[in-house]
Image (spheres, grey):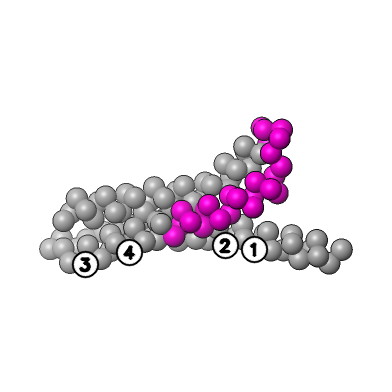
Amino acid sequence: MSSSRRRAGRAAIFFGLLAVLAIPVDIVIAQYLKGVKLLESLYIAVPVAAGLALIALAAARHARYVRARSVYAEGGRWPTRFAWAGIYAAATGGIALAVYGGLRAAQ
């Protein structure tokens, strides 16, 4: 059971880190590739970050579920923190795109 908990916790940290890094990596890619516009790439990066964050959150919940039923129920906060960091990054990107859309509509 502990290996399942560790795998789920590591998966949550991995996907949470990917979710946090999805938007900055997208910005770097848009800077270096001439055919890719920043705004258009963000329309893809923000939902990707949200999807990765939801996967991380599901893995963190699974790790917490397995940990709660284990004899050794210690630790385990980092997977949840990384998953929520991914959620916050995706929400921030979504808010930024919504504000931009509102400003464009107001012109």
Cα distance, mark 3 to mark 1?
Answer: 35 Å
Is disc 3 placed on a helix, strand or loop?
Answer: helix
Q: Is residue 23 above or below residue 28?
A: below
Left or right: 103 with respect to 75? right
Residue type, mark 4 in image: Arg
Q: Residue 19: give x, y in percent of width and height.
A: 49, 51
Q: Which mark is residue 68?
A: 3
Left or right: 43 with respect to 68? right
Which of the two labelled residues, at mark 1 and mark 4, occupies the earlier sequence position? Answer: 4
Is disc 4 placed on a helix, strand or loop?
Answer: helix
Query: Which quadrant holds the N terminus?
Result: bottom left
Cα distance, mark 1 to mark 4?
Answer: 26 Å
Is disc 2 placed on a helix, strand or loop?
Answer: helix
Q: Tag 3: Cα neighbours inside 10 Å, few (<14), some, or many (≥20)?
A: few
Report the residue at 63% width, 42% height from top.
27
Q: Residue 39: give x, y in percent of width and height.
A: 70, 49
- Residue 98 magenta: no
Quadrant housing residue 57? bottom left
Q: What residue did someone put label 4 on?
A: 61
Task: Provide the residue span drawn in magenta.
Answer: 31-54
- Residue 53 visible here: yes
Circles 4 and 2, Cβ within 8 Å, touching? The answer is: no
Q: What residue did someone put label 1 on?
A: 95
Report the residue at 50% width, 60% height from top.
87
